[in-house]
Image (cartoon, rainbow, N blue to C red):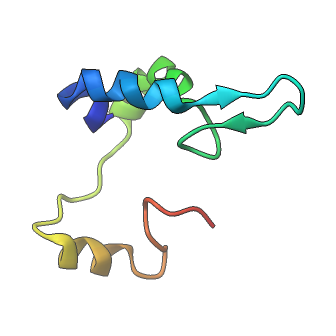
Amino acid sequence: MGLYREHPDLFELAKAYEKYDEETGERYTWSQRESLDELIARAAEISERPRKKEASNWTDLIAEEEGDGCPYCFK
Protein backbone atom coordinates (compact mmCIF):
# COMPACT_ATOMS: atom_id res chain seq x y z
CA MET A 1 0.00 0.00 0.00
CA GLY A 2 2.91 2.33 0.69
CA LEU A 3 4.29 1.81 -2.80
CA TYR A 4 0.83 2.47 -4.26
CA ARG A 5 0.45 5.71 -2.30
CA GLU A 6 4.00 7.03 -2.45
CA HIS A 7 5.23 5.81 -5.86
CA PRO A 8 2.27 5.08 -8.16
CA ASP A 9 4.55 4.90 -11.20
CA LEU A 10 6.63 2.14 -9.61
CA PHE A 11 3.47 0.39 -8.44
CA GLU A 12 2.27 0.24 -12.05
CA LEU A 13 5.65 -1.10 -13.11
CA ALA A 14 5.42 -3.81 -10.44
CA LYS A 15 1.95 -4.75 -11.69
CA ALA A 16 3.37 -5.21 -15.20
CA TYR A 17 5.58 -8.03 -13.86
CA GLU A 18 2.61 -10.02 -12.59
CA LYS A 19 1.42 -12.65 -15.04
CA TYR A 20 -1.20 -15.35 -15.41
CA ASP A 21 -0.21 -18.41 -17.45
CA GLU A 22 -3.42 -19.56 -19.13
CA GLU A 23 -1.80 -22.82 -20.20
CA THR A 24 -0.84 -23.96 -16.70
CA GLY A 25 -3.18 -21.82 -14.61
CA GLU A 26 -0.22 -20.53 -12.61
CA ARG A 27 -0.27 -16.99 -11.27
CA TYR A 28 2.96 -15.06 -10.87
CA THR A 29 2.32 -12.31 -8.35
CA TRP A 30 4.25 -10.38 -5.68
CA SER A 31 2.10 -11.93 -2.98
CA GLN A 32 1.21 -15.61 -2.68
CA ARG A 33 -2.40 -14.79 -1.94
CA GLU A 34 -3.36 -12.00 -4.34
CA SER A 35 -2.36 -9.81 -7.23
CA LEU A 36 -1.60 -6.13 -6.79
CA ASP A 37 -4.93 -5.32 -8.47
CA GLU A 38 -6.70 -7.50 -5.89
CA LEU A 39 -4.75 -5.79 -3.12
CA ILE A 40 -5.92 -2.35 -4.25
CA ALA A 41 -9.49 -3.62 -4.60
CA ARG A 42 -9.50 -4.26 -0.85
CA ALA A 43 -7.56 -1.14 0.12
CA ALA A 44 -10.40 0.17 2.30
CA GLU A 45 -10.41 -3.05 4.31
CA ILE A 46 -6.66 -2.82 4.83
CA SER A 47 -6.73 0.79 5.97
CA GLU A 48 -9.44 -0.01 8.57
CA ARG A 49 -7.33 -2.66 10.32
CA PRO A 50 -5.79 -1.72 13.63
CA ARG A 51 -2.11 -0.94 13.11
CA LYS A 52 0.72 -2.25 15.20
CA LYS A 53 2.73 0.40 16.99
CA GLU A 54 5.19 2.11 14.70
CA ALA A 55 8.69 0.73 15.04
CA SER A 56 11.34 3.40 15.44
CA ASN A 57 13.95 1.38 13.54
CA TRP A 58 14.58 -2.03 11.95
CA THR A 59 15.83 -3.48 15.24
CA ASP A 60 12.53 -2.62 16.91
CA LEU A 61 10.59 -4.05 13.97
CA ILE A 62 12.52 -7.33 14.06
CA ALA A 63 12.15 -7.58 17.83
CA GLU A 64 8.42 -6.90 17.59
CA GLU A 65 7.94 -9.55 14.90
CA GLU A 66 10.20 -12.17 16.51
CA GLY A 67 8.22 -15.33 16.99
CA ASP A 68 5.77 -14.40 14.25
CA GLY A 69 8.48 -14.33 11.59
CA CYS A 70 9.25 -11.65 9.11
CA PRO A 71 6.13 -9.70 8.10
CA TYR A 72 7.39 -9.64 4.51
CA CYS A 73 8.28 -13.33 4.26
CA PHE A 74 6.08 -16.27 3.41
CA LYS A 75 5.92 -19.47 5.42
Residue beneath the point at 29% across and 56% down: 52
Task: Give left or right: position of 68 versus 65.
Answer: right
State the image coordinates of residue 31 (x, y, percent, origin top left): 56, 44
State the image coordinates of residue 68 (x, y, percent, origin top left): 49, 73
For the image, the number of numbered tags is 0
Q: Pick out the residue farthest to the right.
A: 23
Q: Pick out the residue farthest to the left.
A: 56
Q: Quadrant of residue 75?
A: bottom right
Question: As rendered, which of 46 and 34 lies closer to the eye?
Answer: 34
Task: Give left or right: position of 73 versus 9.
Answer: right
Residue beneath the point at 25% across and 70% down: 61
Question: As rendered, which of 24 and 67 lies closer to the eye?
Answer: 24
Is residue 3 visible in the rendered image? The answer is: yes
Q: Is residue 49 above or below residue 55?
A: above
Residue beneath the point at 85% across and 30% down: 25
Residue beneath the point at 30% across and 76% down: 62
Question: As rendered, which of 48 and 56 lies closer to the eye?
Answer: 56
State the image coordinates of residue 37 (x, y, percent, origin top left): 52, 21
Is residue 36 visible in the rendered image? The answer is: no
Q: Is residue 70 above or below residue 9?
A: below
State the image coordinates of residue 1 (x, y, percent, origin top left): 33, 34
